[in-house]
Image (tube, rainbow, N blue to C red):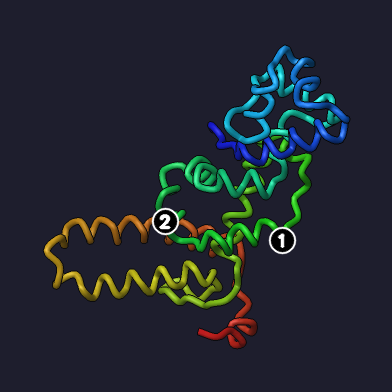
Amino acid sequence: MKTKINKKAVGSRIRQIRLNKGYTLESFGKLFGASKGNVQQWENGVSLPNKERLTTIAKIADMTVNELVYGSVDEFLKFNYEKIITHTHRDHGELILKTINISNFLKFIKDKKLDNSLLNDLDNLLEIIWDLSNDYIMNTKQKTYTTEKGSYIISDDLYKLIQALKILESHKDKTNNRAQLDDTIESFYKVINMYLEDKIESTPIDTEYLDNIDN
């Protein structure tokens, strides 16, 4: 997965490293065969040092290149959540993005306080975020939903989407693009059912708990 990088944040980290080590712009640039102007561009987030220079800067700061480039798990996620969701959920990624409240999802991940050392194993980090995205979608326990298979708890975001789909279905006869609307509704329900089936198989519902949930 090709990741996005916050160049301004990287530049800020490079500037802090330079200042902490007592280098001027010119003397810092000489460490890499770069000009004062090059260093200024890095620090202003205009451009990034090449891989070799990033490696050297990371060594100077006693950190890994990924820690220098991404800063923290929270920063990495903020700039890459769309790519992460579409990459890890593949065919359903675009639809799943529409089922979640992004600000709430980012807060949900942040509250998990994932160790920033995970930046050094991005494949593992992606797997963790994939699991957490499933947890967020299905286990943010705020609403109950009932089907022919029974009742269970789902996230408020997913609950609202289901209600919106029901409203769309009730208005299908009033649109000129009924075929397209049918396809959209069907696609969303496929994603929803995929999660609901996983939930039913993996987590029995506590009916006593359901009685205490607002609908």
Q: Which of the image's four quarters has the N terminus?
A: top right
Residue 118 lies in quadrant: top right
Please report whichever mark, 2 or 1, sits nearer to the chain's N-terminal start. 1
Tell me, for residue 40, which label it has, or none.
none
Residue 110 lies in quadrant: bottom right
Q: Is residue 35 above or below residue 115?
A: above
Alpha carbons under labels 2 and 1: distance apart: 26 Å
Q: What residue is shown at x 23% (from left), y 60% (from top)?
A: 182
Depth check: give the residue in front, 113 or 196: 113
Measured as percent of width and height from the top left, residue 65 is found at 73, 28
Q: Tag count in the figure?
A: 2
Residue density around tag 1, few if under 14, some if 14–19, many if 20 or more, within 10 Å:
few
Residue density around tag 2, few if under 14, some if 14–19, many if 20 or more, within 10 Å:
some
Q: Is residue 200 above or below residue 46?
A: below
Nearer the observer, disc 2 or disc 1? Answer: 1
Q: Is residue 9 above or below residue 145?
A: above
Depth check: give the residue in front, 76 or 36: 36
Give the SS element for disc 1.
helix
Three-letter amino acid code at the position of disc 1:
Asp
Q: Is residue 178 above or below residue 26?
A: below
Q: What residue is shown at x 61% (from left), y 57% (from top)?
A: 106
Give the SS element for disc 2.
helix
The residue labelled by disc 1 is 111
Tell me, for residue 191, which label it has, or none.
2
Measured as percent of width and height from the top left, residue 53 is found at 71, 19
In the image, 76: left or right of 17?
left
Three-letter amino acid code at the position of disc 2:
Val
